[in-house]
Amino acid sequence: MTDIWFFAALTLAMLGLGFAAARWRRPARPHSLEEWGVGGRAFGNWVTWFLLGGSMYTAYTFVAVPAATYGVGAIGFFAVPFAVITTPMMYLISTRAWSVSHVHGFVTSAEFARARFGSRGLAALIALTGIAATMPYIAVQLIALQAILKSAGVPGEWPLLVAVVAVSLCTFRSGLRAPALLSIAKDVLLVWLVLSMAMVVAWSGGWRVAFERADRRLAFDASPVSGLLLPDNGRLGYFTLIIGSALAIFAYPHAVTGILAAKDRATIKRNAAAMPLYCLALGFMALLGIFAIGQGVRPVGGDLNTVMPQLFDVTLPAWSAGIAYAAIGVAALIPAAVMSIAAANLFTRSIYREYLRRNASEAEEATVSRYTSLLMKFGAVACIVAFDQQLSIELQLIGGVVILQTLPAVVAGLWTSWFHRFALAGGLLGGLAVGMLMLYQVPQRAADGRIVKAHFGGSSWPVGALGSVYIGLIALAVNVAVVVVATMAFKAMRVPAGRDLTRPEDYLADGDSPSLQRLDILVDGLPRAKVGAHAKDGG
């Protein structure tokens, strides 16, 4: 019972902090989407660091990754190299995305695609794709929270609903400032959790004992992919899953939102350089899945998502387990909040303002986003309640395949406007069709090879002796081929392309751009001197 009281008290304190975020450095324009949706583009090094870590290294990361290593061993470590290679990609991609968005006032990647390729239809398609991919991602964050509640012995769905209502009210009131402030407090708990478990591992015989025990169990596992080393036919699937996941992360709306909230390019660069520190924490948590095998941990009701909470319960004192529960629980609510804000921004800017209310005011935009964010969270809860949780996990894998299809427009578009708008739309739809068709044909198999479910049973496509390939990359290859061929065809037929509203210098602009009101004084203060491209020409 002590663990539940500590968990509840810390979670309530965190949510209170989220409500207080509305008054944290009170904004100049509190009722604008610029302020509510991207924090006034005002976050400096530390706030951006915690926000990006809180939204990209989610609770599901710290629950699902050790659950995977507990269940199958080496394959579960794919998230670690995937996280490592995102750092140089972030350095290259995010700075350009931040600059052009800062100059033009974009709060979503769909708006950028509209301006770059001159097509509001393409922007709407990207927005709908982003919303569809984000909904299951929110759901799996809440599944992680539910796993904590299940392990703590809290029955029913009502505690999850109460937590979602509370974080929804925080987000509705404070916007992106709520998860930003909560991320700082969450990381304090996360550091404590990592250090505590490191001591537990040392006191329990160290990693050698854990790996010996895990090796004995995995060696007798019926699954052909289980083991401390990758099977020969599992390497291609492992590699393609890493590459596909790394590419997908920059297309997800919540990652874009965290990046656009930074106050200048230097902030993005510093965070890209420092982000591998989170990879260390992720790698340690992945190893805890191996450690859990050695400790004889058994998941509740066969749900592997409960492995980590059960490990805390077995190895830590009750009060300490309660703190660990709170760290993971709050880490679930933060990305759920950021994701719902990002999806709401997509709807407001690319659907509502473009097709329903062309002359919507700033206050109206913010109001629409607030209510849309509520719908996103409660829609995710409805998915968890109405469907089997395993389906929600599979939907998240499908979400990765879905969001990858926006890459030609929202990432490649940062370097070139050569693609034709109709070709991009056709490629996106073609990639989605191929991806969904392939996912539909993948069965889910039990450890003994028996087919448990005929359709949507995984995200890897078998390729004979080579093993398998992540379906998202296959669909993306089809997408790119369609885009390139169709672009050449449209250009040959002289079909008018959309007008590019951006300029080359927009992609290098820094935080002192005169085209957008400075708001960073609200959080970190104005810079002492001009930096970046504008320092060269005197601003």
Image (tube, rainbow, N blue to C red):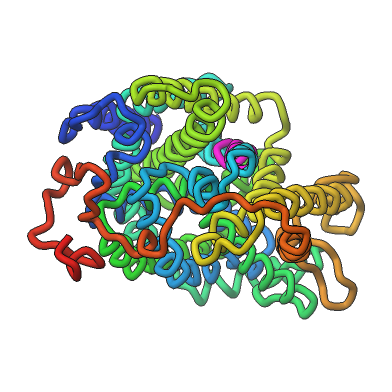
In the displayed structure, would residue 367 be above or below residue 46?
above
Q: Quadrant of residue 431?
A: bottom right
- Which quadrant of the figure contains the C terminus? bottom left
Camera-side residue of 300 and 406: 406
Rendered position, 304 above or below 95? above
Query: Quadrant where the N terminus lies?
Result: top left
Image: magenta residue range: 129-140
Residue 436, horizontal then vertical, whole percent:
80, 48
Q: Can residue 479 be seen in this view?
A: no
List x then y, in percent, for residue 257.
41, 45
Residue beneath the point at 51% across and 53% down = 500
Residue 265's x, y, as percent?
A: 29, 61
Name the side, left or right, on which 65 lies relative to 338.
Answer: right
Residue beneath the point at 52% across and 28% down: 377
Residue at 70% of width from left, 75% of height from top?
230
Main SS, magenta residues: helix
**Image check: 116 left or right of 121?**
left
Asked whether 133 falls inside the magenta stretch, the response is: yes
Q: Is residue 73 visible?
A: yes
Examine the image and state in which quarter residue 469 appears.
bottom right
Coordinates of residue 54 in the picture (x, y in percent): 39, 48
Q: What residue occupies the far left of the structure in this picture? A: 528
Q: Nearer the viewer, residue 70 or 46?
A: 46
Q: Which of 199 and 195 is in front in this view?
A: 195
